[in-house]
Image: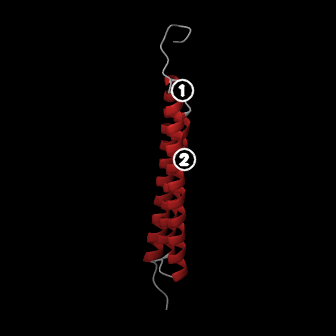
Amino acid sequence: MDQNGNSKFEIPNDMRAMAQASFDQARKAFEGLLSAAQRTASSFEDQGTAARAGAKDVASKAIGFAEANVRASLDYAERLMKAKDMTDIMRLHSEYVQAQMRALADQAGEIGQALTRAAMETAKPKTQ
């Protein structure tokens, strides 16, 4: 209980340690997956199998945004594990949701612009 007589929500240290270990494993797995995806994308580019520059740009942006969103989620989860009480959890959640809404709006705009550019490039008459 705190000084006002309210019961405080606290996560036991053992549970925090177990959550941190699981979180660290998830982050390492994500890093490995991301590295493999980037190597695969590079090998496609090296082999010349990428469709058009516009499509490559859209795919690159999408991968970058997915990476940023997963990293933001992992960072959020890590901050939640360190929260001291329910007020801290609610503040962290509010900050995360607001930041993600802004990020998703920005990302949608960038993807839209990249798709427009790709469509315009595709519609251009081909010169021989």
Q: Is residue 41 above or below residue 6?
A: below
Marks 1 and 2 in Cβ contact (< 8 Å): no
Answer with left or right where residue 116 lies relative to residue 79.
left
Outermost residue toward the bottom?
A: 128
Q: Amino acid at mark 1?
A: Asp
Q: Amino acid at mark 2?
A: Asp
Where is residue 114? Give x, y as percent: 49, 64
Residue at label 1? 88
Which colour scheme appears in the figure? secondary structure
Label 2, residues with CA under 10 Å away: few <14, some 14-19, many ≥20: some
Give the mark nearest the N terminus, 1 or 2.
Answer: 2
Q: Judge by depth and name the residue closer to the eye, 68 or 21.
A: 21
Q: Is residue 95 visible?
A: no
Residue 24, which numbered label?
2
Q: Nearer the viewer, mark 1 or mark 2?
A: 2
Q: Judge by depth and name the residue closer to the eye, 24 or 50.
A: 24
Where is residue 120? Give x, y as percent: 46, 71
Tell me the residue at 47%/42% (across/down): 101
